[in-house]
Image (tube, rainbow, N blue to C red):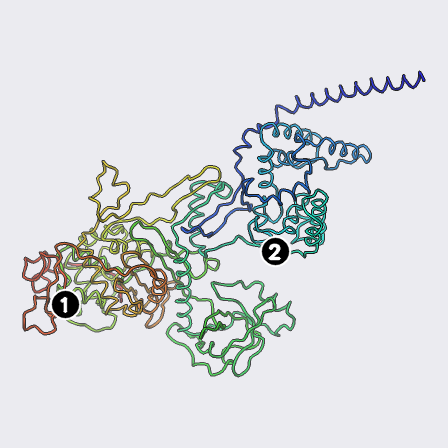
Amino acid sequence: MKWLLKIVKFGLILGIVGAFAAAAALAAAYYYLEPDLPDINNLRDVRLQVPLKVYSSDDKLIAEFGEKRRNPLTYDQIPERMIQAFLSAEDTNFFEHPGVDYRGLLRAGVQLALTGKKKQGGSTITMQVARNFYLSSQKTYTRKLSEIFLALRIEKELSKKEILELYLNKIYLGQRAYGVGAAARVYYGKPVEELDLAQTAMIAGLPKAPSSFNPLANPPRAIERRNYVLGRMLELGYINRAEHDAATAQPISASRYAPDIEVDAPYIAEMVRADLVERFGEDAYTGGYSVRTTVKSSDQTAANRAVRDALDDYGERHGYYGAEAQLDPVPAEQTALDAALADRPTVGALRAAIVTAVDDKSAAIYLGGGKQAVLDFEQMKWAHTFIDTDRRGAAPKKPADVVKPGDLIRVRQIEVKQQVTWRLAQIPRVAGALIALDPDDGAIRALVGGYDFYQSKFNRVTQAKRQPGSGFKAFIYSAALENGFTPASLINDAPVVFEDASLEGDWRPENYSGKFFGPTRLREALTKSRNLVSIRLLRSMGVDAALQHIAKFGFNPDELPHNLSLALGSADVTPLQMATGYAILANGGYRVEPYLIERIEQDGVGVVYQAEPKRVCHDCPPPVEDDGSAQTQAPRVLDERNRYLMYSMMQDVIRRGTATKARELGRKDLAGKTGTTNDQRDAWFNGFNQRLVANAWVGFDDNGKLGRGEVGGRAALPAWMDFMREALKDVPDIEPKMPENIVSVRIDPNTGEKATGSTEGAIFEVFREEDAPGAATGDGALGDGSITRPAPVVSPPPTRDLF
């Protein structure tokens, strides 16, 4: 027995010595590693790498930018069942252990002793947090010891709930998804609180091997892992047998979901992305920034549809370009048809399709994914063969005149007699744009920079400098009013020739119709867009005087022509510049600056930027620098009477001028101006009421001709109308209030003079009180409306503008 006691005694001594040695080794390891261990105090204020998100003014998602998908959640926002699933899969004793599972570590140590292989094991959720935030995933003894020490330190600083919140927001779960919030969106397209038990367990099974157990990449192993998690939940009492059996019987319901984009506004998204990168650099993509824009989602949707419909209609008026490609022979297998469509993404709302058969009344088409449809001849009749923008071939008489089997074509859905059907389409070669502003503060309510952003990222609203044509006459006529003219002033609409040695010949500007109408009142000239009147008007007041006034509308005179061609809109401007200028006519004469970003917030920080636009205040006194009002109040740049007269004249453009089609909208408060440039290369409509300004433009990016008859009232006005019909649906129809010192006088329409009792066809006209017929005449016009100034020598370029 003595030898047995000696053995026990030796064992005890050896154990004590071993324990002291192990403790000493651990202490030595701690003191060795401690200087390099990070400070974990900043875990409380940790900033997760959250992508940039862009929202509309009504909080609908426009875009998301960033490599990592993450939707941070607070602990209280995470469903209890999700927490139970992760504890079952990763760390059963999380709420009991001090951050380290010693039994798990012991098992890992035994495994190492028996096999000689390092194997991950014994990692608690706290240790995973330490690794994910501070350490690499490389399997080394040093890293494991650092992980243990950090976990113990984290447990002292943070509560269990704080640790679990960090973990469930940080953990990588495959498909670029970090955290359970993002995983729910990526795999199931819904928020985490809407997941069922099987989906919850599927996500909880991913941390161990996000690739191997991924339901999209490896469904069999994903189901195996999900069922393991469900089994553990059953063992731990989190679910009952019936719930377990129902969940394990479910098939995989995961799919690859893109961000839930609610508003189609990619041009807006790109403008915001570029702005944020300029402000914050590359941190814009990971800093957790959320941007609220001024865009109204319903207006943006209406603008998208309006521009696309207008460009589709233009294409149909000019003929069919033909199939995009021809498959010969026509594939018989669905897989081959799908492969042919794989590299033909939808453009706008135009879907690629393959013609599989043609008969006397229709064509059979294949749309991909097993879907087939019928294209009736009625929806192909428009497809005359395109020759050029002025010519097209004969009308087709049967489907075979348009398509044949194997044609790869485009189709779009339309509604006919409350039935949805398919219509032959084609990707437009022509371009278009639309911009809408709130005239009271410059907020951009809708912006469409082209037919399809992914086809062409060129933003024609902000980047395309085009001639505005007669749309620029609004600013010329306002300058004329400022220089003493009235709406009743008479200007002779007659041929004129300007000599210029720099030109090969004389400049002979014309009206679009080629006709001349003699002495014409200003109102009538603007309504009918008479070019020669505008030129004589500009010559009379002087180019310099006009430029000085036009600068009030936000244009830089140095960038504008300093000759009479200015009267015909020969300047190069963007649609955004035109909308900004027209906002002054809409809002009563105040200068506002367009802006897109209303607010920028950052996760964990709050609001980091808040727009403070200058707003129109009709009842406020003029802003004074000293009292701060100049910082918030839009300055008046145009006399209210000038603005009222311009608004009134531009209402007539719609009532009886070049935009009478807009009367279909049934509103009295609309005003605007068409614009068409030389040879119909640009078509515009610039229009507004007191609540909204919108400009539509149509043209070719290479400045090609649109074709005969493609003036602003035909090519661009329909887009403007379709947009305003929706955007003004709930806006009251209120005309401008007549300012003080404006009078209405009955005049002779042929002379502009005050009418007498015997005057035939007398009409009412509005005047500034001092300019009314019978009062002292203003500078630049006599009582009979004739121009008296001599014509200065000018040097206009050889351009002829139209509407």
Label 1 to label 2: alpha-carbon separation = 71 Å
Q: Would residue 663 be visible to someone looking at this image?
A: yes
Going by the image, does 267 lie left or right of 356? left
Asked whether disc 1 touches disc 2, contact meaning CB atoms under 8 Å apart, the reply is no
Quarter of the image holding residue 123? Answer: top right
Does any portion of residue 795 appear in the rendered image? no
Residue at 79% x, 18% y is: 17
Q: Position of residue 384 (x, y in %)?
A: 44, 77
Image check: 725 left or right of 128? left
Q: Position of residue 407 (x, y in %)?
A: 55, 73
Answer with the quarter of the image where residue 626 lies.
top left
Task: Tell me the crowding category of disc 1: few under 14, some 14 to 19, or many 20 or more residues within 10 angstroms, Cα based.
Answer: some
Q: Which residue is mark 1?
A: 492
Q: Which mark is residue 747?
A: none
Residues 378 and 677: in front is 378
**Element on which disc 1 rests:** strand
Residue at left offset 45%, top offset 78%: 381
The amino acid type of the residue labelled 1 equals: Asn
Foreground pick, 646 / 86: 86
Residue type at tag 2: Ser
**Side of 339 relative to 600 (left or right):** right
Circle 2 SS class: loop
What quarter of the picture does the N terminus occupy? top right
Percent across and percent down for residue 800 are 26, 66
Question: Can you give x and y, in whole percent of width and height, for residue 350 in the image?
Answer: 49, 66
Q: In the picture shown, does residue 625 fall above or below 189?
A: above
Q: Which residue is mark 2?
A: 255
